[in-house]
Amino acid sequence: MSPKRTRGQNAGLTRQAILRAALALADREGLKALSMRRIGQELGVEAMSLYQHVASKDALLDGLVEQVVTQAAPLLAEAASWQEALREYAHALLRALLAHPNVVPLVVSRPAITPGNLRLMEEGLRVLRAAGLPPDRALDMLYAVTGFVVGHVAVLAAGEVAGGTERAAPAMRDIPEPDLVETPLLAEATRARRAQPSSGTDRRFVFALEAMLRGFGGEPGESGEP
């Protein structure tokens, strides 16, 4: 740990450095470990000096969400089509959330309207708008994909708790064979799923995401009802 600096030695302290330290602390010890005092210790500064860059604990938590979510930003602008853009974004967000499972409950509970998150949304809307989609529909798509990914990871994270620290499971657990005796169709589906080769990516995630992207290609308001 670095020796604590005096007030005049904090010139190199930045919001980004504070948020990186907070994310590293949350990854190691969970959200309960987050406090201005602990983060100051991590950075070797007095806790009060953090408030020059992060106005409050709420601003710190919002920034922590921003740190994770904006990891998906670079991929969104590199795709050749809007479908590929949303697909890349979804997978990038999935990877980011799974890399920081202790922060997932925070992502679920906080909208985190920060400049970084707004820039991410603006870039996504720019890509979708360039593909000919109206801004309001493009925004609905972004919200739908983001909500789907966050919800998917939240279910995984909720299923794995060890030592008070949340950990995301690699995939949804299959139902044990003894529990399927009285449900033959569910047993058949479960066995067929187990027999499929693993691709390293949750098949349920891919299936639902691709269905969502196909649905986005329909006419606005299209429900399939007669």
Image (cartoon, helix red, strand yellow):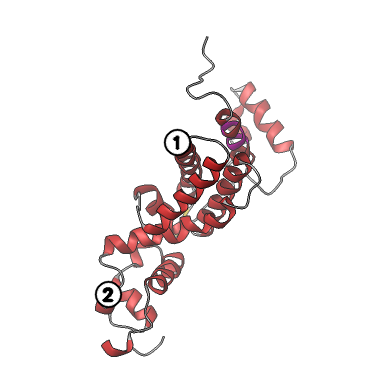
State the image coordinates of residue 167 (x, y, percent, origin top left).
49, 56
Q: Outermost residue, top direction? A: 226
In primary-sequence order, the first of circles 2 and 1 is 2
Looking at the picture, tell me which residue is in the foreground, 215 or 108. 215
Dominant SS in magenta: helix
Q: Amino acid at mark 1?
A: Asp
In the image, is residue 209 part of the stretch drawn in magenta?
A: yes
Q: In the rendered view, tell whether residue 34 sits above or below residue 65.
A: below
Distance, label 2 to label 1, CA atoms, is 36 Å
In the image, is residue 210 part of the stretch drawn in magenta?
A: yes
Can the viewer see residue 120 in this picture? yes
SS at badge 2: loop
Q: In the rendered view, tell whether residue 225 sits above or below residue 124.
A: above
Around disc 2, counting alpha carbons within 10 Å, would you say few (fewer than 14), some (14 to 19), or many (20 or more)?
few
Q: Amino acid at mark 2?
A: Gln
What residue is disc 2 on? 52
State the image coordinates of residue 59 (x, y, percent, origin top left).
30, 62
Can the viewer see residue 165 in this picture? no
Mark carried by residue 171: none
SS at badge 1: helix
Mark carried by residue 140: 1
Q: How many marks?
A: 2
Which portion, as a residue range, is magenta? Answer: 207-212
Around disc 1, counting alpha carbons within 10 Å, would you say few (fewer than 14), some (14 to 19), or many (20 or more)?
few
Which residue is located at x 37 percent, y 79 percent? 13
Which residue is located at x 34 percent, y 80 percent? 41
